[in-house]
Image (cartoon, grey):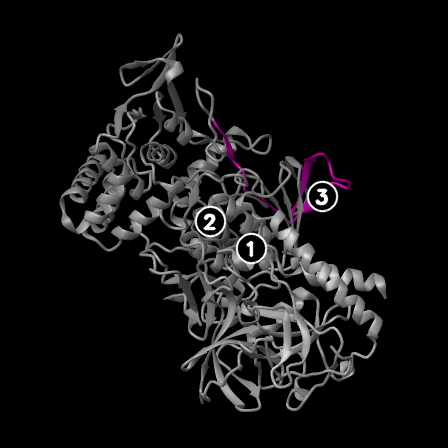
Amino acid sequence: MIAKQIVEAASVPRRPGLYCLGPFPRRVSFSAQQYRALNLVWALHEENRLKEDSEVAVIGAGLAGLTAAAAFAGYGCKVDLYDQTSATMSKQRHTYHRMVHPSVNQWPERELSFTTELPFLEWYAGACSDIVQTVTDEFAKLPQVTFFSNHEATDVVTVATDRLGLYLEPARTPRPSYDLVMLTIGFGEEGGGAFPPIDYWTADSLESLREKGGIHFIVSGCGDGGLIDALRLVHTNLRRGRLIFETAAALSGTPIAEAIKGAERKVEVTLDLNTLKTTYEQCAALLDEDSRYADIAKSLSASYVQKATLVFLLDRRHERPYSLRAAPIHKLMVAHALRAGMITYYQGEVTDQGGKIVAGGRTFDPHKCQVIVRHGASAKFGRLLGEDEILELKNKQKALADHYATKLWTDPYPVPRDYPAHDTRSKKFAEHRRKWAVRAVRQISPDANVALTPDGYEVSFAPPIPADAPDRLFGVSVKSIITPQIEVS
Amino acid sequence: MSADTLVFPGMLLSDQFGESSYTVGAIIFDRNNVCYGLTARHVLEKQRSNDVVDAFTGRVIGQRVVSDPQWDAQEPFHHAIGRFVIPSASVKMATPYKSVVGLADPRELVGSDIFWLSDSDGNAPAKVMAVGGAVSINWRRRNGSSMSTTMSDVIKVETLSAPVAGPGELGTLLVDRSDRAVGLLIFRHGDTAFVAPLLPYLDELKAKLADDRHSAVSGVNRNLESMRADLLQVDHGMARMKRELQSSADTPGLGDEEAPADLDKLLAAAS
């Protein structure tokens, strides 16, 4: 039943064979997009829309496109992947300044896992550019997928019964046609409104600007992008996001985590944002006042900037910066920063009024003020979809898209040729993932190593074993040890 | 160094001062047909001279390959195997090494038994507990200062019937049930031992285990031997100069080791 719903939500109205993964969900993250792609391809197979030798085109070589292409390959399809840029995942290839995590955005509803547990193209919590390298290297080895770079898809037309023709710029001759076309595009550029846009994925110099001093920062938007950038500005030890992961790990299983989980679940139903406000403010106070959280509070407080930097956070839609869209850990850390006086929040907009910047009733000199607009990327499909089609897709997907950001398929997910089946107890599987496991643990400690043992992985660290050492990697159980020391006389 | 010096796997070696002893675990030929003996690197590294001698006769049978600058850096160190050039020798596949056939992939050995070959221990079994692990070796350099080097991608084994550790056993070859060479013993303490795998090392070096077809390195004549000795000296000097010039060098791989690479090129050109 769920397979049918997923296929229905992704079907472009009145254009059989054309499906759209869509940029419409509320909580978009790397892993969520991968789950959506895997669920959709699985659902297409369940609904008999795929045959083993189907010819498929995937438009858009972001992480969702790569995952969908690999999934089609797993089902035995021949896949052509197109992107208008020169490389797969080109947007995030140079994102050195941000870390991404497989599950921190879903915490505490989902248990934190340091690695993804996907049938292929797995990754780990780490620097975005590093993860892109890992995923794209692996993807490039798939023989069933042909990647066409610098090709913009401009139209999809029905050319025969159950056959879609694809128009491209530059054109391919003869014009290619497919049994199925999937759009994994839609994330347009991030707008800056009246202000120069600072792309979320493009390396910026916000921390350097802060260190220089004399600049106020105005962050507009209370989604994850806005909250993370506000945290970047007030924390000196954020380490590209690592502090966020560590804080979530340290709070796992505590009354604070339980309170947040309860409040988020409740507000999903009641939509009463006052519950979130009360919960996050109380939890932030608890962090400071309850001795059980002393270490966490200490690490946060020690990380706050000492310089007189003013960070303003605004959102015109919310009285307080706790929306349902943003990840709970970001909201909690912002609540703590607000309580510590590191961030000032206003409900309102930032505007440029004749050379003066106005935000929250205050006026700023534009030469001493940096505005960061984080209102999210707009949905953009070029000439491929019309306005009415986009609207219809949005309405269909809105309710379902969040729901299918978790695993819904039935195991085992078929894997592309040369991939070991996703069996966490198999030695072959563990060995295949070990090179990624090594990269993963080196995000925690640069001299960590991963050995393969009869029981799973044995991870060795230089002493002491870090507090956030994982207990599993890619689903394989982990035993952490101190690297054996040999004394040679 | 005489042309009929006998070198064979399992042979006990030493430095010329008799300060350390170790075992030739394997004899290999690289792509230029240069012959090397392999042993535990840290033992080879800490001896004071480059000469490798037969522990019983005191004859010089080889020259240690000059270490790369990485050995002195606090970086993870990936090769726990050391090698020495055997310029001119008769290599003999002595029993029980005659039975060694090919190389084992360590990844296939997790949880299985392997065996080490030595005259004193016989075919003592050991169980592979982990592959791809790391071990940190703390040791004293020749100048007296101490250092710690982490060697990764080693095999951890549990010795099932632990024979008494004999002097000079480091470097001993271990084989699997099918008599495929697994790696060289680099450390043993109590029931735990660490083995450096041969397969990745030889793959990277593009080298092969010596076998009966290589039982005599007779193609090397005395003139070439003399030239090789001269070149080795020159090359050591070059290596020293290079290290001085590259005090902040990146961590090179095995192929970047100075002496053999240059030496091989020169020898290939000479022959």
Earlier in the chain: of badge 1 and badge 3, it is 1
Which residue is pictured at 54% across the width and 85% down the height? B115
In the image, which is nearer the foreground, mark 3 or mark 2? 2
Q: Dividing the image into 4 quarters, which one contains the N terminus of chain A?
A: bottom left
Have a look at marks 3 and 2 and say if they share a chain.
yes
Compute the Cα span from label 3 to label 2: 26 Å
Residue identifier under label 1: A71
Quarter assignment of residue A276: top left
Residue A256 appearing in the image: no
Residue identifier under label 2: A36
Name the kind of residue labelled 2 in the image. Arg
What is the number of callouts on the image? 3
Magenta stretch holds residue A183: yes
List x then y, in percent, for residue A394: 45, 36
Compute the Cα span from label 2 to label 1: 11 Å
List x then y, in percent, for residue B222: 83, 74
Residue identifier under label 3: A176
Earlier in the chain: of badge 3 and badge 2, it is 2
Tell me where the magenta segment starts and ends, as one range: A163-190
Which residue is pictured at 62% across the width and 72% down the height? B199
Earlier in the chain: of badge 2 and badge 1, it is 2
Name the kind of residue labelled 1 in the image. Ala
Have a look at marks 2 and 1 and say if they share a chain.
yes
Given residues A431 and A184, the one toward you in this image is A431
Q: Is residue B255 left or right of residue A394?
A: right
Name the kind of residue labelled 3 in the image. Pro
